[in-house]
Image (cartoon, rainbow, N blue to C red):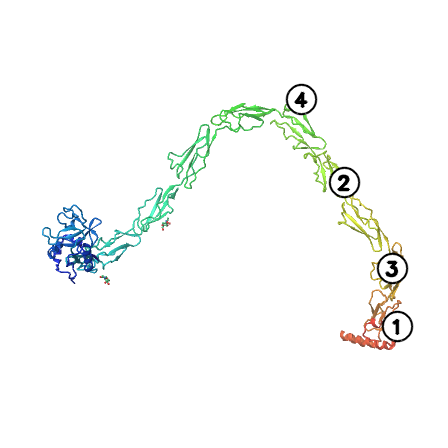
Amino acid sequence: MELSFGLLQTCRPKTSWISFIFLYSMLCIWTNVECWSYFYSNNNNMTWPQARAWCREHYTDMVAIQNQEEIGHLNSWLPRKRTYYWIGIRKVENVWTWVGTGKALTPEATNWAKGEPNNGRRGRSKRVKEDCVEMYIKSDSQPGKWNDERCEKLKTALCYTAACKNDSCRYGDCVETINSHECACFEGFYGEKCEQVVQCNMEEVTVPYKGSVNCTHKYGNFSYDSSCQYSCDEGYQLSVARPLKCNASQQWSEQPPSCELVQCQGLSSPAGGSMKCSDPLGNSSYQSTCVFTCDEGHVLAGSPSNTLQCEASGMWNASQPLCLAVQCPSLQQLDNGFVNCGADADVMFSYGNTCSFSCGPGYHLVGPSKAACTSAAVWSDRKPRCEAITCQLPEVGAHLVTECSRPLTKLRPNSTCSFSCEAGFELQGAPSTQCSEGGLWSKAIPTCTAIGCLAPEVPTSGQISCSPALSSPVFTVTPHPLGTVCIFTCDEGHILASSPSNTLQCEASGMWNASQPLCLAVQCPSLQQLDNGFVNCGADADVMFSYGNICSFSCGPGYHLVGPSKVACTSAAVWSDRKPRCEAITCQLPEVGAHLVTECSRPLTKLRPNSTCSFSCEAGFELQGAPSTQCSEGGLWSKAIPTCTAIGCLAPEVPTSGQISCSPALSSPASTVTPHPLGTVCIFTCDEGHELQGALGMECANPGQWTSAPPNCTAVRCPLLEAPENGDINCSNSEPVFNSQCSFTCSQDYSLEGHELLTCDRHGNWTSGQKPTCQAPPSPVTAIASGVATGGALLSGLSLAVWILKRLKQRANKFELNSNSDIEAPPQVYKNSIDSLI
Ligand SMILES: *[C@@H]1O[C@H](CO)[C@@H](O)[C@H](O)[C@H]1NC(C)=O
Ligand SMILES: *[C@@H]1O[C@H](CO)[C@@H](O)[C@H](O)[C@H]1NC(C)=O
């Protein structure tokens, strides 16, 4: 709410106000009625500043004059005072100003007395400053008018009290009236205190199809200044975007808008293509989709997509595509010719256009005469070329010699060729011809017919004999007449080649009936290089292995030749000698001297130069000569091979089953490598049952040799025993030597008579002088025994054991064997006791 003094408003004549003006005759008395009330001071002794201070202290301010009515009221109501009244106008920075509002005094509002304001110029020479204003209340001549005065003058204060309060008017300006106030309502409001707001028809705010509305109310529901903003669903737009506003005349500012389908710009089919649209909502409208396709030979361009969609913004989501004809590579002019693709430069190389080709004069087209640009952006055919028109080089006829203008590869029109024949032939036809503008020869190419055969060449290393012979055989250019026969022969070591026959005949064609023979040297087998050596057959590779050539051989360093040093290739196509070989030069392995120990660098098969051998002697010998030697480059040893001389004898071998006793005895006889000194004597003895064979003793003599070989100890032998009749023998040794044992057994039903076990003693005798025999049993016993025998094999084994036991008992009694002897002990244990018995 705005509180105003209404000073300006009161300047507006408003007759209706008159009825609201209440006049109060109050003398410094405050009234409790809310109105614009006037007051004046009792005394008239106040300067303008004092008067204003007094007004502001006790009332609202100094009086502000609003209109003539107010002036009339004050003039009639206030008592006349000689010094008049101060009012609330004074000069501020040289402008007359309402002090209450600080606003300048407008010309319309002024109520100056005649001739005023004059700023003290009335008949006085000296100017005084008259910056304050008095009112001539009840003046005779000019009642109620204003006069400018010096502010220090003493006058009566004229004050007022404002009627408007903060809450006087709700939605309006409070206007002070004389002794009261009134509310000037703002637009859209009414009522005494402007507390009522005008309303618009809410029913008029309708919701459109595909739209919605949102109203905001400032003062009241659908009242002044309410605003209804419409919006549409996606793809629709408002017919009027402005909101509906409720105005002071209770009318909505607009008709409710409608929601209209968003439209995109219409599209059209592109040249060289077509368009297919689907319009779910409306033609070229929101959500319409158009698909563009191009005709054959055209490609989509000008858009990133072949499908366009109308968006809610009313724009297609991509620019409209074009269909451009595909472009074939541009065709350059032909060398010496022309390319014609039509006059329209834009479509010259585009799909569907055809270019034709032609050649300049003197050239003809090689290749297609036209090509079309295909939908694949390539030409339907390759580009031709223009070739100069030429005549073919005349074919080389047999024996025909042709001479044409050069260059031969470009026989252009007007070139000429002339013809002749080889010797022995003559021309049939025109001797020359000329190339025409059409590329053909003016005359047919002539031929050559034979008048004889050319003399064959005499082969190297050979001869020719022809019949009939030519009168001057040196001139080979003279042809042999048809029918001539020539026979070829070759020198020794050469054979006829390159022809199936050694006889040639001149035929009607002017040719020999076979190719001319050659005489070639026979070839020996090629010689490979030697291992570790060289073959030198001369520098000419052609004749290296030919008849008559000689090859020589040599070996590399460290090798020497074994075989012939050279061979020659014979007319029989074999070499005159075998191929040699290169052998490594080696030294002979030194001969094995007596007692000499030789150590040579390996391998011993190949003692090459620089190989060494070192020498030492067996135990009991010492070296005579150099201890080592080296193989020289020539294959000989650098030093003579040394020899060994004795310093004693090697310990002799102890015979098997014997002993040896030497004097002087060796300190450690176990080591046989220590040499017995010269003069040592050794005696041999043999073990029991063995006899010495050889010398009984021997002596170590110079040169380190025993005087005899060591003897052998051989076991003594007993006579050979045979099995008894009806019995068997089983011996421990195959030979009946010392300690051999033989046991005897008899066949079934026979009993052994004599000892069953014989041993060979150290004298070569069997322990029992008597060889045992097998006795047949008496007849009755024989029957029983045979009965027992048929009783079973088990029983016979048992009866044999009983029988052996019985026999042993008998023998014990007979020989009085030592009672300690165990009959089950092996024979070796008791052999001594048996020996002692025999
Ligand atoms: C506006 O309308 C609402 C709901 O109908 C109501 O509650 C409220 O009092 C109204 N306000 C005024 C200022 O009339
Ligand atoms: C435009 O919209 C269509 C249909 O949704 C779509 O296929 C196409 O890719 C869009 N184009 C672009 C450039 O986004």
Quarter of the rendering occupied by the N terminus: bottom left
In the displayed orientation, state which residue is furthest to the front. Answer: 125
Label 2 secondary element = loop
**Image position of 802 with respect to 233: above or below:** below
Label 4 to label 3: alpha-carbon separation: 107 Å
Q: Earlier in the sequence, mark 1 or mark 3?
A: 3
Q: Which mark is residue 676?
A: none
Q: Which mark is residue 472?
A: 4
Residue 87 location in percent, x, y? Answer: 16, 54
Ligand 1 location (quadrant): bottom left
Tag 1 and tag 2, C-beta contact below 8 Å: no
Residue 275 location in percent, x, y? Answer: 34, 46
**Residue placed under numbered mark 1 in the picture:** 836
**Residue placed under numbered mark 3 in the picture:** 710
Residue type beneath disc 4:
Ser
Q: Earlier in the sequence, mark 2 or mark 4?
A: 4
Residue 172 location in percent, x, y? Answer: 20, 57
Residue at the (79%, 50%) spot, across then down: 614
Label 1 to label 3: alpha-carbon separation: 34 Å
**Image position of 734 with respect to 818: above or below:** above
Q: Earlier in the sequence, mark 4 or mark 3?
A: 4
Specify the quadrant of the image occupied by residue 274. top left
Specify the quadrant of the image occupied by residue 663. bottom right
Label 2 to label 3: alpha-carbon separation: 54 Å
**Residue placed under numbered mark 2 in the picture:** 563
Tag 1 and tag 3, C-beta contact below 8 Å: no
Residue type beneath disc 3:
Pro
- The 10 Å Cα crowd at callout 1, few under 14, some 14 to 19, many 20 or more, is few
